[in-house]
């Protein structure tokens, strides 16, 4: 394949434009408020992201390289087809459910990251444990899409994969480093526009190529690109669908957008807009997959064998752009695919660094850290995590397998924990740890074909693939998720009963999850006052005070801004002063 100077110039121009927008967004918002506001500006955009920018950035977070390339691949591959392209419907429903049930409670309580409620209810240790699968999911996702980008660029303009991965990652790291969520959000607007325009421009040219049959005609054939679901595969299909629909909720990249919105209602509307955007952005990818399945490749410059036999089905989208579209159209489409990849990679890197800086560094080790210190920790971890994702994309041969496994852990471990911490009253650290371990055990023992990991538990319907790795048809991932959920509830209430009934002495509550928490709640209801340190505000009949330890970090101070000016408080203080005199 010859080296295409035009393609290289197009990529350089596009990357420079994205870098310019990212730096402009950082400059535009660099003087927004005080240092404290600056820290929130980097993590949650100062909580003033509007509907337009918010809708674009939330949509772009899902519409990444894996979403676009994976949808086209699923439609193209014989035996799968549109019936197995679950990502568009699965992620759209995930956003709808997130908007209906999760966005409002998270935003209304003023949290900064997804892990905040876990550390507030379960403590720092549990927050650190839940950080592990959350970090793995974000990092392996970024590495997987960087790898996909390198392969895509190499298909069209024939440059070294390593160079394309490094340059792409460097661009994303730079504008995320200088601007945080503002840069990511504004570049997402440009990138999503390029994705939409680039792919839709490519579709009519590819469809009108002489080697492409009418996709309506091929849809009616026996081996149709519409695909079908065999009776034996129904449970496996449902397992994967629930993983996308429910496992797509507990991601920091999603909640970062939710928490950046100006109100809880806006957070819900953003989720619904992004759900619609995901469906719309999937349409050109579906059509490109159908075009690839309807093409006689022997009549193209690609020739035979076809992409399936060459094991290049995962690259069907750039192959269609390269061989079925004019040169200038294929280069524009390449920019669209590059935009899709970068729009997800920058979100993952920022999400991982936000969770580390706040939930690990600040809340676990340096609770008195200054805002300037937290900002610098975020900048350092953005670079470190970005470099690590780039290295994995270059070196790991099974990065997709690692991402599949880590996304499973988010579905099996974090989702049931999130349900409990938001909606099930009375769960505690003991139940959370037990649910975590049971879910992890059931997932690992179920095996993972992408990592050539043989199962230890064989569920009904298993079979051996061509690599002699046993594959499960039984929905064991959903079983593991439900087991984790009910284990959390059962162990939590059991521990609560044993300690409160006196069956176990208080000294055995080594996690301070039942006895110490119950004592703390009672202490917060009554204020202890020393004779030499009387503070009038503390004696007034105000709402129960939060503890001055970890819980105070999560208090939404805006909710108490009007307390001091209330007439009840003023009367209480006047009465107290009169009595004192």
Image: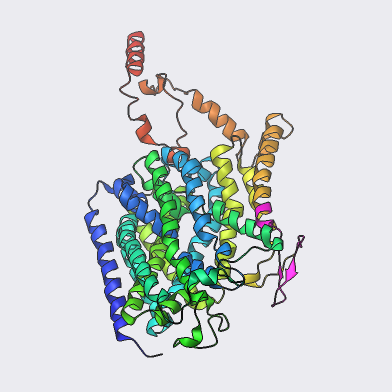
Where does the N terminus fall, quadrant-wise?
bottom left
Does the magenta run of residues contain 471? yes
In the rendering, at what x and y percent does residue 202 appear?
Answer: 37, 72
Where does the C terminus fall, quadrant-wise?
top left
In the rendering, at what x and y percent does residue 39 appear?
Answer: 33, 50
Establish if 548 lies above or below 154.
above
Q: Residue at the spot x=39%, y=39% of the render?
A: 265
How did the renderer colour the structure? rainbow
Which secondary structure dominates the residues rendered in magenta? loop
Q: Residue at the spot x=49%, y=48% of the render?
A: 115
Q: Residue at the spot x=24%, y=53% of the render?
A: 29
Residue 513: quarter of image: top right
State left or right for residue 210 relative to residue 327.
right
Residue span colored magenta: 457-479
In this view of the protein, can residue 247 be seen by the observer?
yes
Query: Farthest residue toward the bottom?
Result: 2
Tally of numbered discs: 0
Establish if 51 lies above or below 335.
above
Does the magenta run of residues contain 288? no
In this view of the protein, can residue 351 be seen by the observer?
no
In the rendering, at what x and y percent does residue 295 appear?
Answer: 49, 79
Q: Nearer the viewer, residue 24 or 468?
A: 468
Q: Nearer the viewer, residue 477 or 494?
A: 477
Establish if 275 lies above or below 554.
below
Q: Nearer the viewer, residue 87 or 557?
A: 87
Establish if 557 lies above or below 233.
above
In the rendering, at what x and y percent does residue 249 appear?
Answer: 51, 51
Q: Nearer the viewer, residue 554 or 247?
A: 247
State left or right for residue 120 relative to residue 468.
left
């Amino acid at each position: 394949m010859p080296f295409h100077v035009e393609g290289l110039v197009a990529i350089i121009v596009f990357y420079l434009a994205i870098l310019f927008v990212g730096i402009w967004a950082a400059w535009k918002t660099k003087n927004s408020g005080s240092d404290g506001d600056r820290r929130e500006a980097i993590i949650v955009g100062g909580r003033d992201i509007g509907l337009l920018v918010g809708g674009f950035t939330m949509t772009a977070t899902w519409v990444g390289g894996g979403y676009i390339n994976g949808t086209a691949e699923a439609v193209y591959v014989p035996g799968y087809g549109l019936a197995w392209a679950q990502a568009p419907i699965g992620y759209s429903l995930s956003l709808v459910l997130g908007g209906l049930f999760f966005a409002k409670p998270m935003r209304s309580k003023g949290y900064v990251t997804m892990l905040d409620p876990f550390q507030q209810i379960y403590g720092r240790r549990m927050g650190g444990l839940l950080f592990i699968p959350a970090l793995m999911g974000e990092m392996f996702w970024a590495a997987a899409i960087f790898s996909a980008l390198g392969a895509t660029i190499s298909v069209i303009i024939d440059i070294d994969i390593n160079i394309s991965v490094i340059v792409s990652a460097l661009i994303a790291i730079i504008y995320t480093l200088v601007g945080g969520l503002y840069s990511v959000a504004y570049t997402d607007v440009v990138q999503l526009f390029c994705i939409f325009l680039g792919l839709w421009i490519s579709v009519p040219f590819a469809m009108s190529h002489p080697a492409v049959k009418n996709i309506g005609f091929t849809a009616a054939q026996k081996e149709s690109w519409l695909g079908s679901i065999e009776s034996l595969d129904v449970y496996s299909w449902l397992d994967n669908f629930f993983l996308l629909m429910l496992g797509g909720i507990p991601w920091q990249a999603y909640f970062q957008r939710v928490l950046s919105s100006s109100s809880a209602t806006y957070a819900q509307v953003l989720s619904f807009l992004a759900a619609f955007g995901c469906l719309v952005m999937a349409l050109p990818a579906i059509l490109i997959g159908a075009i690839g399945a309807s093409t006689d490749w022997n009549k193209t410059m690609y020739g035979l064998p076809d992409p399936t036999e060459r094991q290049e089905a995962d690259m069907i989208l750039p192959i269609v752009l390269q061989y079925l579209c004019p040169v200038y159209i294929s280069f524009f489409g390449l920019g669209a695919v590059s935009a899709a990849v970068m729009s997800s990679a920058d979100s993952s890197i920022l999400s991982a660094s936000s969770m580390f800086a706040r939930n690990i560094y600040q809340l676990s080790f340096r609770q008195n850290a200054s805002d300037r210190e937290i900002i610098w920790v975020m900048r350092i971890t953005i670079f470190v995590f970005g470099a690590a994702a780039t290295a994995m994309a270059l070196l790991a041969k099974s990065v997709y397998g690692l991402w599949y496994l880590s996304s499973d852990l988010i579905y099996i471990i974090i989702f049931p924990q999130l349900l409990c911490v938001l909606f099930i009253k009375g769960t505690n650290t003991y139940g959370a740890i037990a649910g975590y371990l049971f879910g992890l055990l059931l997932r690992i023992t179920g095996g993972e074909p992408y990592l050539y990991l043989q199962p230890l538990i064989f569920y009904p319907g298993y079979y051996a693939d061509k690599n002699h790795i046993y594959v499960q048809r039984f929905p064991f991932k959903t079983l593991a998720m439900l087991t984790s959920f009910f284990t959390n509830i059962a162990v939590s209430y059991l521990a609560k009963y044993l300690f409160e009934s006196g069956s176990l002495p208080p000294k055995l509550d080594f996690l301070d999850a039942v006895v110490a928490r119950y004592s703390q709640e009672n202490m917060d209801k009554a204020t202890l006052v020393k004779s030499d340190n009387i503070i009038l505000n503390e004696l007034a009949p105000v709402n129960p005070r939060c503890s001055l330890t970890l819980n105070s970090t999560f208090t939404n101070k805006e909710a108490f801004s009007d307390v001091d000016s209330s007439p009840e408080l003023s009367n209480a203080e006047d009465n107290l002063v009169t009595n004192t005199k």
